[in-house]
Image: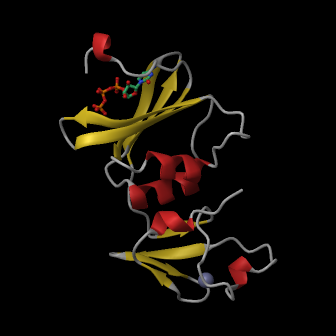
């Protein structure tokens, strides 16, 4: 995309999550824990034309990088995403997300009797399967709608 077509501003420092599966941008915001009260500056572009994907979403977060746990869950809903680290307007790092063997935190187990959903301070932990995720504590499997299990708050 040439500069005169730029849809959202370049950022000075932060992270650009590019090549997000179209329709997943709001779920990406949920993974990042961004809402009206988080005070973070970010830009979202949805349904942007893309050579590689047809259309894609883009999320730009200013002033911070993502944790590995956030990137791991992101890979489950946007497997073609690229993470670009920007410093002083330059992309200094770029990598594709990789599907991890397990994801820790960020998602919550749908089983309300699971130890991770009780008042215990136990982080959620799921094994990543080919077609879903499985809670390491209670073996509950989530196949569809993983984004519906992004923990709030
Ligand atoms: N970007 C940004 N602010 C910057 C630098 C880059 O918002 N200061 C954005 C670009 O708009 C683009 C993404 O970060 O969406 C990646 O930038 P770049 O690597 O320059 O673009 P491409 O080469 O097109 O990336 P790719 O090859 O991964 O498609
Ligand atoms: Zn569980």
Between 118 and 121, the one nearer to me in the picture: 118
Count of numbered circles on the image: 0
Q: Is residue 10 something one can see in this rendering?
A: yes
User: Does the image show residue 17?
Assistant: no
Residue 135 % position (x, y) = 55, 81
Q: Residue at x 59, y 48 (%)?
A: 32
* Relative image position of residue 50 (x, y in whole percent): 23, 35
**Image quarter hosting the C terminus:** bottom right
Give x and y (percent) for residue 72: 49, 58
Residue 75's image quarter?
A: bottom left
* Figure quarter occupied by ligand 1: top left
Residue at 57% across, 83% down: 136
- Viewer-side residue, 87 vs 110: 110
Q: Relative to residue 70, is residue 133 depicted above or below?
A: below
Q: Is residue 5 above or below residue 79?
A: above
Q: Quadrant of the N terminus?
A: top left
At which x and y percent is residue 87?
53, 22
Q: Is residue 105 left or right of residue 23?
A: right
Q: Residue furthest top?
A: 4
In this picture, is 91 found above or below 48?
above
């Amino acid at each position: 995309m040439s500069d005169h077509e730029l849809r959202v501003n370049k950022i000075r420092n932060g992270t650009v999550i590019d090549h997000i599966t179209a329709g997943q941008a709001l779920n990406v915001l949920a993974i990042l824990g961004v809402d009206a009260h988080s005070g973070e500056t970010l830009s979202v572009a949805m349904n942007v034309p893309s050579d590689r994907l047809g259309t894609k979403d883009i999320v730009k977060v200013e002033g911070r990088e993502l944790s590995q746990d956030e990137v791991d869950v992101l890979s489950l809903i946007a497997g073609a995403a690229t993470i670009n680290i920007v410093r002083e307007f330059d992309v200094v790092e770029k990598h594709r997300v990789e599907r991890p063997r397990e994801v820790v935190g960020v998602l919550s187990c749908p089983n309300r009797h699971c130890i991770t959903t009780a008042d215990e301070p136990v982080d959620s932990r799921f094994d990543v399967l080919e077609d879903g995720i499985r809670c390491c504590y209670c073996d509950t499997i989530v196949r569809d709608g993983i984004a519906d299990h992004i923990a709030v708050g």
